[in-house]
Amino acid sequence: MLSDLIKEHIVSPRNQGVIPSADGVGEVVGPTCGDQVVLYIQMKDGCINRASFTTHGCWAAVAMASWITEMVMGSTPAEALAVDGEALAREQAGLPEDKWPCARLVSLALHRAVRDCQRRQSG
Ligand code: FES
């Protein structure tokens, strides 16, 4: 059963859109559905200050991206890399099993955004 929290993100998704001056961008395309999820992060004082997303994915991808971008604001890169979209979808959001891969896409895009940011900082 869907949690109240995820229902709220389904009805009113947050953090949609591009961050033009993002410090890290992560893009993923679903291997089976072909939907794209892009995560943008902006850093301040070593933590994620702002996160946003764009996607052509389904309602579950939108809701999970909304929740996860909200969740990681204020997180360190290590904390963001530990976010497991599928586990959140299964254990907290109550998404149906066929939507777990959509949540996995979101956390994978987040991880890629963090690694992109780390690459830019070390370069
Ligand atoms: Fe493609 Fe959900 S079906 S993101």
Image (cartoon, rainbow, N blue to C red):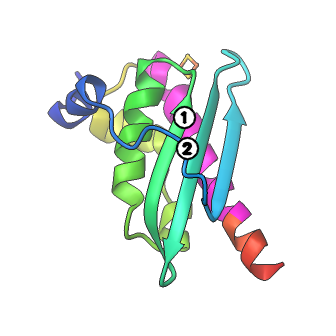
Q: Nearer the viewer, residue 116 or 16?
A: 16
Q: Residue at x 60, y 59 (%)?
A: 22
* Left or right of residue 102, residue 4 in this image: left
Q: Nearer the viewer, residue 4 or 50?
A: 50
Amino acid at pointer 1: Thr
Quadrant location of the N terminus? top left
Seen in the picture, residue 67 relative to 35 is either above or below; the reply is below
Q: Secondary structure at mark 1?
A: strand
Residues under numbered marks 1 and 2 in contact, where contact means CB atoms less than 8 Å apart: yes
Q: Residue at x 76, y 71 (%)?
A: 120
- Judge whether residue 104 can be spotted in this image: no
Q: Which mark is residue 113?
A: none
Marks 1 and 2, how far apart at CA:
7 Å
Circle 2 is placed at which residue position?
18
Q: Quadrant of residue 92?
A: top left
Q: Main secondary structure of the magenta part?
A: helix
Amino acid at pointer 2: Val
Q: Quadrant of residue 114?
A: bottom right
Q: Which residues are magenta?
A: 97-116
* Left or right of residue 51, residue 13 in this image: left
Quadrant location of the C terminus? bottom right
Circle 1 is placed at which residue position?
54
Seen in the picture, residue 28 relative to 45 is either above or below; the reply is above
Residue 102 colored magenta? Answer: yes
Q: Residue at x 37, y 70 (%)?
A: 74
- Judge whether residue 17 can be spotted in this image: yes
Q: Nearer the viewer, residue 102 or 66?
A: 66
